[in-house]
Each structure stands twice: as structure tokens, then as C-alpha cells.
Image: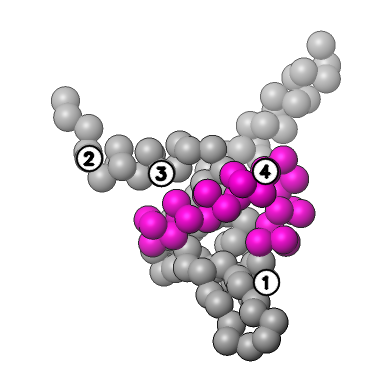
Amino acid sequence: MKICPYLESSFQILGRKWNGLIIHYLSLCPDGRSHFSEMKRDIEEITPRALSLKLSELGEHELIVKKVSGESPVVISYELTEKGRALATALQPIQQWALEYQKINMEESESK
């Protein structure tokens, strides 16, 4: 049986640490965009270097876009592309699964 190369490619992107979480985070932002400092604050364990690398990587895959304002001081924000929003929608059932089964795992661990 041959595995679909498109699915394999998608898992290679999502399987890299932080990528799925960044996509999910941006999908939750009220105006659909966030600044580097906000993401660094809210995704607590990611280092600034890792965040910078991941944002570049996701941009290369056309999942996010970096927006630079023309005003002074320059303001940089990141937002999902249409392709990124579609992926975020596909991740919603995974989030539901995680909420359901992580809760069960936590309850089982606490009862032991």
C-alpha cells in the first residue's frame, strides 16, 4: 500500500515541534493576527529563536504571512493565509480529541 505523498508532506509540516500550536494560536486571535512578542508571551515554552525559525518555516509553506506596516515605528504582525486557515479548521477535531482524551488521562493519573 502506498501512502499519499500529500498527506505525508502535511504530516512533515505538522510533525515539527511548535508548528501546529502556532497555527492553532493564530486561529484563536480575535483579529486573526498576532505580533511576535504576543506569541512569545502566550506560547510560554518556545524560545525567541525557535519562534522566529518556525514563523519563517510556516511562511515558506504559505501557511502564514508576515505583514509590515509602513508607519513609524514599524509594526510587524503575522496572520494565517487562506491555506493556513483551512489547516486550522482541520486541526479543530484534533483539539477536541485532545481535550477529551487528555482529560481522561489526567483523571486516570490522579486516581492512581
Q: Is residue 39 magenta?
A: yes
Question: Vertical placement of 94 versus 104: above or below?
Answer: below
Q: Quadrant of residue 73?
A: bottom right
Q: Secondary structure at mark 1?
A: loop
Earlier residue among tags 4 and 2: 2
Viewer-nearest of discs 4 and 2? 4
Mark with earlier residue (4, 1): 1
Compared to residue 22, the image places residue 68 above or below, namely: below
Marks 1 and 3, the one that precedes in the sequence:
3
| Residue at (57% x, 53% y) in the render | 52
Which residue type carries mark 4? Ile
Looking at the image, is mark 4 or mark 3 nearer the viewer? 4
Name which residue type carries label 3: Ile
Q: Residue furthest bottom?
A: 71
First in sequence: mark 1 or mark 2? 2
Residue 65 tag number: none
- Name the residue beneath numbered marker 4: 46
Relative vertical location of residue 104 with respect to residue 42 in this rendering, above or below: above
